[in-house]
Structure formats: structure tokens, C-alpha cells
Amino acid sequence: MLARFSPAAAQAAAPLVVETQHLSLVLAVGDNHRLYQRYLGPRLLAPADYARLAGGHEAYVSAGLDNLFEPAVGLTHADGNPSLELLFVDAQTAEPSPGVRTTTVRLRDPQYPVEVLLHYAAYAAEDVIKTWTEIKHQERKALVLNHYASAMLHLQAPQYWLTQFHGDWAEEMRQQEAPLTSGIKVVDSKLGARADVYQTPAFFLALGKAADETSGEVLAGTLGWTGNFRLAFELDNQNDLRLSAGINPYASAYTLAPNTPFVTPEFIFTYSTQGKGQASRNLHRWARRYGVLDGTQPRLTLLNNWESTFFDFNEPKLDAIMADAGRLGVDLFLLDDGWFGNKYPRSADNAGLGDWQPTRTKLPNGLGHLVQEATKNGIKFGIWLEPEMVNPKSELYEKHPDWLLKLPNRPEDLSRNQLVLDLTNPKVQDFVFHTVADVFTQNPGLAYVKWDCNRPMTNAYSQYLGADQSHLYVDYVRGFYKVCERLRQQYPHVPIMLCSGGGGRTDYGALKYFTEFWPSDNTDAAERVFIQWGYSNFFPALTLACHVTNWNPQQSLKFRTDVAMMGRLGYDVDLAKLTPAELAFSQQAVKEYKRLSPVIWQGDQYRLRSPYESNQPVVLYVAADRARAVLFAYNLHTRFHETVLRVRLQGLDPARRYRVAETNLVPGTTSRLADQGQTYSGDYLMQVGLKVSDDEARALTSHVLELTAE
Ligand code: DGJ
């Protein structure tokens, strides 16, 4: 039996404070030696006040003893005992880098050799806390983990308003907000090879009353995991809220061998007393610095061929497209799906997936020729891969039937004519790694990858895991991360887009390895205003790949371009079909974007008017030094005689004067904005505001304004 009374009892008396500039999470050890969360909220001014906090709820609640609500952790010991008690052992803090402070709290069961480490990393300037858990044991045999949340947090408020984001293919990130009622509200997914598409692992929780962009107390949280997730919000009999976030334990009881730590994914959260806008800006700053690969570095503008050719292309056609890309002025050409497969050429989505050799009939000179041709046109070359998937019509399927996720005694359940490879199997991990690495080795000029993942898991069964089928959902994602880890060791900085048939993979678990993600296949610009608005709540603009396409050719090219400029700009149109005037506008837009993008990518974002509340949404990006700002204003489905509203800006320096200039105008037109060319103080712009449209606002039009401090 382990000591019930910790030698660290003295340490236990003082509260453990995990804090950032404006946020505190206070933990303390109770007389019963369990760990309690005493407080979570705005940082208190007097540190001495922390010692006065009392009560609270057990910080990381275990199942099987006296707990009557949702547990954070639950397990069955090797002897069949289904209970766990967690008592405080010790806590350690460290400062791995300036501005980042980690706290690790060790808890242990007094009867069984099971240890739980609660990890917290506090990012002072960004006001973000990242938390995750490690569970390990030294029992003589394996134990079974039934619940293993990354985080549990407790909140107390008269009311709780949850904003969640749901959707489907091409309608991602639809926002819904509602008060929580007693009982458990669960937001989760069971898609296996991706986290989202129906539900997103990110939320706002407003306390007391619904928060808006500039007011209200709000916790914003998101789970970094590219698979099944579960966010549970339980309102108890005392009106206290227990939030748990982690891998979805659905069908995932995990048999844990002795001395093998189970490390959960990270839960990332921030807390704002000034509404959702500040919460998002905190997450954006954190993400650029710590959460996204190369988040402080520039992104590449590109031309993609998917929507202009689909599978129907050959070498001369691609050469011509690359010449067009050079003329357009973008940085890179991205060759999409359809370039591979010989025995089963990929001329539709029903064949070739898994056979990553260029189709000789389409590309007789291989990818090497395309890389060279790109270079000739002064651009870089990137390529589409979907390395985790296989078509039954492929050589890979014929050679390695044991590499598929496939239920015995059941028919194959195809989706988009494909199956998922079994990434729990190290041989498959090797295959996926080499699929990507070999393209780089064979084509040293390759500068970008779009990594697709077009289906969730169904009828899933691993031929590798044998009796441990309930490890599949967890080990698949871990297998995926292992491959990413290996790739990043070899290619630390090549930009890679995370794509999942639209927005199925948009999470900070994967963004450690990826530079951006594809928010949606839906590139109708009016729809994108909503979709990008949704993602902007949690992800900075430079992570959102936004392309000008012909999804809705009724919309003007300017409107489509302005919307795509709010992220990482790309094109997916047949440039040969543009009129000379349209091409000239696009060439100018690319140049304009290069000038504006540092502010869009690295600036602070202010969502000034929501498309959910207004026909005239407005988003502003302000550079860190407040010397420049870029504003995007839209007229969506404008009504007859609709009044054009002023918008009050935010984030400027009130004492400085800013010159207002409309930019990205169609060549040959001039601005009709009343404030064009005017200079105002930041104070005026924030108190009085600007009219960001002319008075004859027409539906589906847009304006981009640049503000420059004098
Ligand atoms: C789904 C992606 O979202 C599209 O952009 C495109 O790459 C196709 N897959 C290709 O199959």
C-alpha cells in the first residue's frame, strides 16, 4: 500500500496557481488529500487572495468511488476492481521557454500502483492554458481505461451559454448558441479518421449571459485530436458546470500495459472578460507562436487545377496551366488528384488510390518535368496526396489486402469508392511515410503538399490489432501522428495543407505538423463568409486556405477574390477562360494581397459585424504595431433600400491618425466610398466609425479598405 499521507503535505497547503497575464486556474489539496479546483477565472489582483479560496470540485474526478457525475478518468484494475482514488503526491513547475510555465501535478491511488499526471502549460502573454493528462501504472497485468479525459474544468455561473459549430460536407462550421440546461450536453464525433465535419471540437462557453464579440465572460476551448472527440458539459444539481474534454471513449476501452504511459491529447483554452473577439485573438496569437507549424512565417499563394480540370488533364494541359500561374503571379502551382496509377489509372475516383506512381499516359515525363516547367515559369510546384486511403481497384489493394480496415464476415463499405488503410499497423505507417517522403526524394523541387483524407471510418476493423479492436480509433490517430513526426524530422518546413474532403481535419493536434487547412469544398463566396467566420473563432487567418473558384460564377470575380483574401489566397479557376480585364484584376489582386497579407496573417482580428446578425458583415485585421489595418466589408443578400450602416472599428491607436484607402478595386473603376482618401483619428474611427459601403449597396458586393497610420 502506498502512503496515504504524502510527504509533500506542506507543499499541499499552498494553492497551486496556473496563471497567465489575465487568467488563473487555482488548485489546492484538501484535507482528504484529493486535488480540488478552487477557482477558474480572471486573475485576482492580490495573490494572497488565492489562499482564501475554499471548496470547489475535485479537479480530475475518478470513477468508481463516491463520484455521482461525469468522471474524467475511469478504469478497471488488473484484479477487476473498477475504482480509482487519486491523491496528491507532488507538483512541479518549470519554465521551458520565456513566457511559458508548466505545472505537473502527480496524483496516485493509495491502494493500487496507478499514477495520473495532470499537465498544464500556461502561456502568459497569450492568456492560453494547454492541459493534458498522463496515466500510467505498475500493476502486474494490464488494466483497462474506460474514460481518459484530457481535461476537466469546473465553472460556476447563474447561466451557461454554449456556442457550438456543426455542419456537413460543404456546410461546415454553422454556428449555434443556446443556454445549457441540467444534465449533460455532449458534442462529439465518431468518424475515426478525422475529428469533424458534423461537429467541431471547439466551442465558446459564456458565463452568466450570452457573450458577444466585445462583452461577456467566455471560455473558448478546443481539443487537439484528429479523431473521435468528446466535449461534455454537465450541469449538476447545484447549477455548477463540469466540463470534460478528450478522446471519445466510445468503443475505445484501452488496455494499458504496465509502465506504458497513456498520454491524452491536449485541450487548449483561453478565458476572456471582453467577449468572444478577445478569446479568438488569444487563440490566434497562441496558435501562430506555438500551435501551428511555422505560424509566424509567410504562406504561399497558389493556383490549383482541381476545379478547372478534375481528373481530365495531361502534360501539355498542365504545362499551359503552369504558364498561366506564372502570368497570374502566384507563388506555386498545386497539382491535385488524378496524376497517379498505371495498372489502374486514376481517371475517376474509383481507381488508382494507393498506387503513387505518375500515370505514364498522362504524364510521360513524370513529375520531374512538371517541377522543371514550374521553375521555368518562376513558380514552385506542389502536389496532392491521399496516402491513408486505397481504392479496391488498385495494385496496393491487390498486394496488401491485410493493410485495410475491413470487417470480417461483412461486405466492404465503400465511401467515395475507397477504404481506409490500417494506420495502427507499423508497416502501413511505413508505407504512408514513404509515399510522401519518396515524392520529395524523387522530386527535390517539390515545395508543397495537399494531404487529403476523403472518408471517415465505417465497418472498421483492424487486421493488425487482433483482440485489441477497441484500440483502433486511438491508435489510428497515433499512427497518423507518428508518420507526421517522421516526415517533419526529414522535412521540417515544407508547407502541407490538411484537407479532409473539406473541413474534416481542422484541429490543433494535426496543425502541429501542418501549415494550413482546407476549410470546405464549398467555395461559393457568400457561403465562405460564414464558413471562414466560423473557423476564425479558433484559427488564425493564415491557417485557412481560401481559393477563388467558379463554384458560383454568378458572383463577381471581385467579390470572390475579396472573400478569399481573408485567409491564405489561392485560385482554382481556368485562367484561360478569364477575360483580359478579369486576368488584369486577378494579377493586381495577387500583388495587392502580397502587400496586405502580413497584416491579415499576423495581425489581430476583429470581427466587427457578424453575417449571422447582419447582411453587412465586416472583419478587420490590425497589425501588432497598430500602424496598418485591413478591413473587409460585404453586402450579402441586400434588401430593397437597405440602409448602409456605419461600423465602429476596434483595435486602433486612438491617438494616431489613419488614412483610409479602398484597395483591390477593379481596374478602371474608382472608389465610391464617402471616406475614400480621408484621414481620421483612431479615436474617431472607433467611436464614430466608417461607412464601409456606398449608399447603393448591391447584393454580393465587397470592399477592401486599407488604413495606414500617418
Ligand atoms: C477533396 C478535396 O476537398 C478537393 O479539394 C479535392 O482535392 C478532391 N478531394 C480531390 O479528390
Image (cartoon, helix red, strand yellow):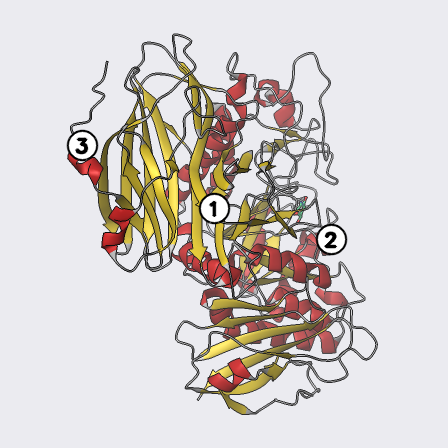
Please tell me the numbered disc located at residue 115: none
Callout 3: few (<14), some (14-19), or many (20+) C-alpha neighbours within 10 Å?
some
Q: Which residue is mark 1?
A: 508
Report x, y in % for residue 96.
25, 48
Q: Is residue 10 above or below residue 521?
A: above
Q: Nearer the viewer, mark 1 or mark 3?
A: 3
Give the CA distance from mark 2 to mark 3. Answer: 69 Å
Q: Is residue 238 left or right of residue 354?
A: left
| Amino acid type for the residue under numbered disc 1 | Tyr
Label 2 sits on residue: 309
Residue drawn 36% across and 40% down? 37
Pair 1/2: label in front: 1
Q: Residue furthest bottom?
A: 678
Most foreground residue, 272 or 708: 272
Amino acid type at mark 3: Ala
Secondary structure beneath dot 3 equals helix
Mark 1 in CB contact with mark 3 (< 8 angstroms): no
Name the foreground residue: 584 vs 703.
Answer: 703
